[in-house]
C-alpha cells in the first residue's frame, strides 16, 4: 500500500469537515485505491479558533507556503478562497513542487485556471476542482468522464444557492428582499458581512466560466459578459410572475451561437411547469444538452460543508486512483480560444415593469417609446395604486434586441412620469 | 500514441450507432487519451442486414468467439443482450484473454456480474457497464467516482422508459393500457415481439440490483424480491390518482433497513408536486441519498442509440485513460453479502380499488375484512356505475403491513360480490 500524505490549507467549516471525513473514511479509501492516506500537514489563519477536532500542533504550519515544500505532502487541499493573494501562491507553488492540488476555489480557477492548468500538466500532477461548481453535484466529473465525447451545445442552471433560496423564500413568504436576505444570513445561507458576490451574479458567473471551458473544450474566457444579480427583484415582480404562471430564477447560461461563446448570468422568468422552475431553496441544478446523449440533468445541494466535502473527497479519490491528469479533460495546448458573441445582438422576450404617475398619457408615452425601439408588446397589465396616485405597468414583449431594449429603458431616465428605472427580467 | 484495437459484437441499432460514433470521435478521443483507436473486428448475426454503414468484410467475424482471441483486439464491446448463452460466453472469454470489456447488458451483469468481475480483476482488465443502467445518465460512474466515499442509504428512481412513457401517455390521452402499449411499440419505445420484461418490472429490477451493489459496496443479490409491473394499471386508476393530486410511476427502490437489503420494483403513487412525479415520457431519473452529500438527482434519456452510445463511449474513455479497474468500485473480495429484508414486514399506505356489485352490504363486507387484517382506512371513494349495477370502491389506507394486505386481498377471492382481484398500488 502506497503511503500518501495530505496537507490541508484553510480550516474553516469546509476544511474542518473534510479533515473529519478523511479520518472517518481512511479504511474505505484504502480499499478503493490501495493507498494508506494520512493528513500530515494543516494550516489556518487562527490556530486557536474553536473547531470540531483538536488541532495536532505537530502537523500545524503557521505559513501555508511551508506545506507546499514539505516532502511528506503528496496532495495539497486549498480551502482559503479568493482569486489572488495567498491562495493563488499556495496552489502555484504546490503544483511547481509536483504536489497534486485540490481546490474548492471557483474565483481562483475561473480567473487563473488556464495558467494553473499549464503548470499542473508540465509537472504531471493533478489539479482538481470539482467543489468549485455545484457543491455536491459532480458536474465537472460528469462532463469530463460520464459525458466524455459528447458534443455539448448548451449548459445552464441554478448555480447559486443563496439567490435561489432568497427567490424561493420571497415567493413563499411574500416577504421583501431585504428581510429574506437577513433571514438567509442568519441561517448561514448568505455571507453575513458581504453577500454581494452571491447576489450580483459574480459567483454564478465564475462557475459558468468553468463549465463553459469544460463543456466546449476551450480556454477560460474573460470577456465582458451579461451579468445581472437579484438585488433589484421586488416582491411585486414575484407576485406578477406568479399570476402569469411564471417563476423568477437566477440562471447561469452558456452556449455556442455560430461558434461564438455566449456566457451570461441574470434573473430569468421560467414557466412554472418546467423542471428548472421547480428546483427550490438552496438546491442547485445543471442542465446539459449534448449529442448523442440528449438532455441530462443533475441536481443536488449546492453548498455547505457536507456537499462540498463530498466533492473534495471525489477529487481525492480521482488522484489516488491515478485518474486523468488533464484538469480540463484535454491538454492545455489543444484548448482553443473562442470569440465572444456580442450580447447586444441577442433577442429575448422581456418582462418590463414601469412605476409611473397615474395620469393620462403616460401609458401612451411608454408604448410609443417601445415602438420607436422596435419592441413589440405581447401582453400588458396595469395595476393602479389609487392612494399614491401611481401605477405599475407591466409589459411582456415579443423578442426584442438586447441593444434596443437597453437603449429604450435608458431613454426613460428623463421622463418625469416614470418614477424609477424600469425593471427588466428576461424570459427564458 | 498507443494503438488500441476495438471489437464490437452485435451491430443492431446501438452497435451501429456506436460504430459511427467511434469513427466520428476518433480525433477527439486521441486528444483526451493519447491513443490511436481503431475498430479492428466486428461481428453480427446477419452480415447483410441494412445498416447505416458499410460492413468492412475484412474485419467481420462470423463467430464472435474468434474476436475474443484476436491479438489485435484490446477492448471488446458486447451488444448482443440476454443474460446467458453467447453473450455470457463472449464476455467471459474476452476477460480471460485479458481483453477489456464494455457491455450494455443489464441482464448479464445483474445475474453474472460478481463472477465476471472476479475474472476481470484476476486478469487486471476493466469490465465496464455504464450503459446497463439509465442509458445516458452516467449514474454508475457518479456513484463510483463523483460520489465516491459517500455513505449511500437509499437509491430510487424511474428506471424503465417504456413503462414511464406508457403511464405518462395513459394520463395525457386517457387511452387504455393496451392501446398505448401498441403506440409505444410503433414508436420503438417498447419491444414489438415481447415487451413483457419491460412491463413486468424485470428490466427495472436488473438495474436496481446493479445500483444496490454499487451504492452499498456489496455483492449482487439474487433474493426473491418485491416485483410488480404496470400491466394491471387501468385508466380508471390514473384518473382517480389525478383527482387525489397523485400520479402513478413505476419506481425501482433499494435501501438498507437495519443493515438488511430491501430491493423492490412496483408502481407507486407519488404526490404531483414532487420531483419524481414530474419526470415524464421516456425520461429516466435516479435519486440518491448519501452522506455527506445529501440528496442528489440525475435525469436524462434512459434508452435509445444516442444515450446508450454516450454511456458506451464514457466506458471506452475510462479504459483508454487507464481509470479504475474495480468494476464495482472496490475489490470483489471486499464486497460483502448482505441479508435481505423480509418484504412481508414492510409497512405502506395503500391505494386499493375494488370492483363490486352495487348492492347493499358489500361495502361493509369490505371494511370488515380490512379491519380484520388491521388495515385502517384513511379515505374512501365510491363510484357507482348505474348501468352495469356495479361500483368501484377506492380506499386509501393508513400504513399497513405487506403480509396483512396480501392476505386480506386474497381473502376476497371467494367473495362473489367482488368482481375481480382488487388493484393495489403503494403510496411512496
Image (cartoon, coloured by chain):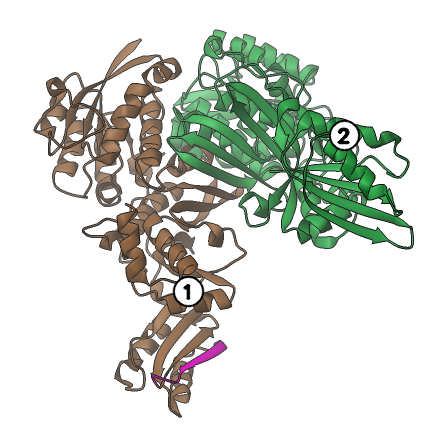
Chain colours: A brown, B green
Residue B195: x %, y % from top left: 75, 33
State the residue in front, B139 or B345.
B345
Q: Is residue B48 visible?
A: no
Indicate the quadrant where residue A124 lies: top left
- Verify CB contact (< 8 Å) between mark 2 and mark 1: no
Residue at 33% from the left image edge and 83% from the top image edge: A388
Q: Which residues are magenta?
A: A378-388
Q: Is residue A248 left or right of residue B56?
A: left
Mark 1 lies on residue: A238
Of the two numbered discs 2 and 1 in the rendering, the one whose residue sits closer to the viewer = 2
User: Which dot marks residue B45?
Assistant: none
The residue drawn where x is 83% and y is 32% is: B412
Mark 2, residues whose alpha carbon is within 10 Å: few (<14), some, or many (≥20)? some
- Disc 2 is placed on an element classified as helix
Is residue A387 found inside the magenta-colored segment of the image? Answer: yes
Is residue A424 or residue B238 the one in the foreground? B238
Quarter of the image containing the N terminus of chain A? top left
Vertical arrangement, residue B264 with respect to residue A337, above or below: above
**Position of residue B33 in the picture relative to residue B155 (left or right):** left
| Residue B298 position in % (x across, y down) | 49, 38
User: Circle 1 sits in a helix, a strand or a loop, which is it?
Assistant: helix
x and y percentages locating residue B400 in the rendered image: 65, 32
Q: Position of residue B1 (x, y in %)?
A: 38, 23
Judging from the image, mark 1 belongs to the subunit labelled: A
Amino acid at each position: 500500500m502506497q503511503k500518501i500524505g495530505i496537507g490541508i490549507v484553510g480550516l474553516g467549516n469546509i476544511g474542518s469537515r473534510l479533515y473529519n471525513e478523511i479520518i472517518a473514511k481512511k479504511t474505505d479509501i484504502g480499499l478503493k485505491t490501495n493507498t494508506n492516506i494520512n493528513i500530515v500537514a494543516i494550516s489556518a489563519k487562527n490556530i486557536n479558533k474553536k473547531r470540531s477536532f483538536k488541532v495536532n500542533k505537530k502537523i500545524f504550519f503557521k505559513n501555508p507556503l511551508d506545506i507546499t515544500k514539505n516532502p511528506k505532502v503528496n496532495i495539497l487541499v486549498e480551502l482559503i478562497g479568493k482569486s489572488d493573494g495567498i491562495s493563488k501562491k499556495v496552489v502555484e507553488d504546490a503544483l511547481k513542487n509536483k504536489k497534486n492540488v485540490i481546490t474548492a476555489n471557483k474565483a481562483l480557477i475561473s480567473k487563473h485556471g488556464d495558467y494553473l492548468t499549464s503548470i499542473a500538466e508540465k509537472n504531471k500532477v493533478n489539479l482538481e476542482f470539482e467543489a468549485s461548481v455545484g457543491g455536491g453535484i459532480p458536474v465537472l466529473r460528469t462532463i469530463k468522464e460520464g459525458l466524455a465525447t459528447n458534443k455539448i451545445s448548451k449548459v445552464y442552471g441554478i448555480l447559486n444557492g443563496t439567490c435561489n433560496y432568497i427567490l424561493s423564500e420571497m415567493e413563499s413568504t411574500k416577504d421583501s428582499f431585504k428581510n429574506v436576505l437577513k433571514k438567509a444570513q442568519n441561517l448561514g445561507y448568505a455571507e453575513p458581512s458581504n453577500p454581494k458576490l452571491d447576489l450580483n451574479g459574480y459567483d454564478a458567473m465564475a462557475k459558468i466560466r468553468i463549465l463553459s471551458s469544460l463543456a466546449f473544450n476551450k480556454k477560460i474566457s474573460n470577456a465582458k459578459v451579461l451579468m445581472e444579480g437579484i438585488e433589484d427583484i421586488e416582491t411585486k415582480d414575484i407576485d406578477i410572475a406568479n399570476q402569469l404562471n411564471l417563476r423568477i430564477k437566477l440562471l447561469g447560461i452558456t452556449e455556442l451561437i455560430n461558434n461564438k461563446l455566449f456566457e451570461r448570468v441574470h434573473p430569468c422568468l421560467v414557466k412554472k411547469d418546467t423542471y428548472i422552475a421547480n428546483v427550490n431553496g438552496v438546491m442547485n441544478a445543471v442542465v446539459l444538452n449534448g449529442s448523442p446523449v440528449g438532455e441530462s440533468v443533475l441536481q443536488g445541494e449546492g453548498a455547505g460543508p457536507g456537499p462540498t466535502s463530498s466533492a473534495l473527497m471525489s477529487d481525492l479519490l480521482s488522484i489516488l486512483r491515478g485518474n486523468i491528469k488533464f484538469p480540463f479533460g484535454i491538454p492545455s495546448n489543444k484548448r482553443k480560444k473562442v470569440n465572444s458573441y456580442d450580447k447586444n445582438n441577442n433577442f429575448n422576450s422581456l418582462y418590463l415593469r414601469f412605476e409611473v404617475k397615474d395620469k393620462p398619457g403616460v401609458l401612451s408615452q411608454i408604448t410609443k417609446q417601445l415602438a420607436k425601439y422596435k419592441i413589440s408588446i405581447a401582453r400588458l397589465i396595469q395595476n393602479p395604486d389609487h392612494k399614491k396616485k401611481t401605477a405599475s405597468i407591466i409589459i411582456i414583449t415579443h423578442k426584442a434586441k438586447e441593444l434596443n431594449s437597453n437603449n429604450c429603458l435608458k431613454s426613460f431616465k428623463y421622463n418625469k412620469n416614470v418614477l424609477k428605472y424600469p425593471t427588466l427580467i428576461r424570459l427564458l
